[in-house]
Amino acid sequence: MNIPRSSYPRIVIIGGGFGGISLAQKLSKKEVQVVLLDKNNYHTFQPLLYQVSTGGLEPDSIAYPLRKVLIGYDNFFFRLAEVNEILAEKKVLNTSIGQVSYDYLVVATGSETNFFGNKELEKNAMAMKSIPQSLNLRSLILENFEQALLTDDYHERDALMNFVIVGGGPTGVELAGALAEIKKGILPKDYPDLDTRRAQINLVQGGDRLLDAMSDNASEKSENFLEKLGVQVWKNTRVTGYNGKTVTTKTDLTFETATLVWAAGVMGATIKGLDAKELLAGGNRLNVNQFNQVEGYPEIFAIGDIACMESKDYPRGHPMMAQPAIQQGKHLGENLVRLVDGKSLKPFSYRDKGSMATVGRNKAVVDLKKIKFQGVFAWFVWMFVHLFFLIGFRNRVVVFVNWVYNYVRFDREARLIIRPFKRNYSQFKD
């Protein structure tokens, strides 16, 4: 890997997400050698992936080069690599570009889409956890409408304009709201010779309310917002399969659709060598102690979505969101310096800064620790917070300008099929 030897302890970080970036920044000026490994050379701001999928933003506005994050810092090295196995006894990683040794290892691999073992859904549904997946979804949405223009079969045309989103969390709610606004303000202009009023957006939730991690007020208000936008909300409905044409559920309700978006769950992205059942908690997450150490491995730490730190307040671990990852990264940076200096570690304490979700233009819900509010002001708060946490001044400016333009013109300029997504449309014909 051409990483020079150093008298400083080597800390290897796997993953350039929120946790990995926060940790690397915290260690940037310390007397340690930091090696960051990631299969991509960029950090993705995942909360805005749905806007890439719906043409509101271009992907480069929510991505940031990992090498640029800590440019100019000594003893920092980035390598574009995929980690295949962790050999904990040897303190060595097997990667796609060779082996790398470590003194301390931090697993910050984040999460991946959880299909709960359903292979049919995994094969045919669309996920939205990465920029390539979001671009595939954007292409498929646009291709479906192009194909709808070409068919004389009403059944096929309806299926092409019917969208089913499974999962009533923030991702599902935000995507449903964005698609509803596209149907209302953009499709009639782009496709004047197509009856886009027949397009349907269905949001399917297995539980009895949306945004079940937020307050009852946020849940109720978000559902009201969506229904006013024309989204059909189906609660207490569990999807059991999708063959690429028909969505089946436990309640015998079915949907004919060319697009099923799976936003119903995530699980930890584990790596071989640390994937034994005794190391894992629910959701495929690594059990860690109050210092983020993986149980049984004092030199290995895990932060963010992959880490499950059980406590009285969080019996199933911290929520799999950006804030816990950022806070754990910063805290672990301090602890690793203390560890190198021979000092005792300090336990991690999560500071809950609240939750929020947007449901469309002038519509959002915000739950803070002491106050909860919805509507236009919540929407402005949502925008400010997301702009603040974007990495890079250019990205903040580009996203802000895009949002202002989209708001004033009621438009989404990035309706481009850059990378076509191949789908067999003949299956919709009788």
Image (cartoon, grey):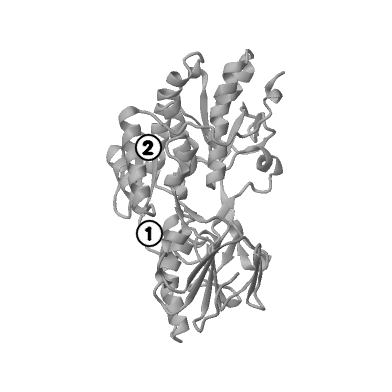
* Viewer-proximal residue among 417 and 280: 417
Q: Which amino acid does the dot numbered 1 rest on?
A: Asp
Tags 2 and 1 in contact by the CB under 8 Å rule? no
Secondary structure at numbered mark 2? helix
Circle 2 Cα neighbour tier, 10 Å, few/some/many (<14 / 14–19 / ≥20): many
Q: Which amino acid does the dot numbered 2 rest on?
A: Lys
Secondary structure at numbered mark 1? loop
**Left or right of 281, for residue 44:** left
Q: Which corner quadrant of the image does residue 403 belong to?
A: top left
* Viewer-proximal residue among 354 and 414: 414
* Residue found 68% across the figure and 41% down from its top: 123
Measured in 3D between alpha carbons, the distance from the residue under mark 2 to the one under mark 1, in whole angstroms, is: 22 Å
Q: Specify whether residue 161 is in view.
A: no
Q: Quadrant of the C terminus?
A: top right
The residue labelled by disc 2 is: 221
Percent across and percent down for residue 310 are 51, 66
Q: How many numbered marks does the figure carry?
A: 2
Q: Earlier in the sequence, mark 2 or mark 1?
A: 2
Q: Which corner quadrant of the image does residue 220 belong to?
A: top left
Percent across and percent down for residue 324 are 44, 60
Q: Is residue 209 above or below residue 143?
A: below
**Left or right of 36, for residue 357:** left
The residue labelled by disc 1 is: 352
Q: Is residue 327 above or below residue 188?
A: below
Q: Quadrant of the N terminus?
A: bottom right
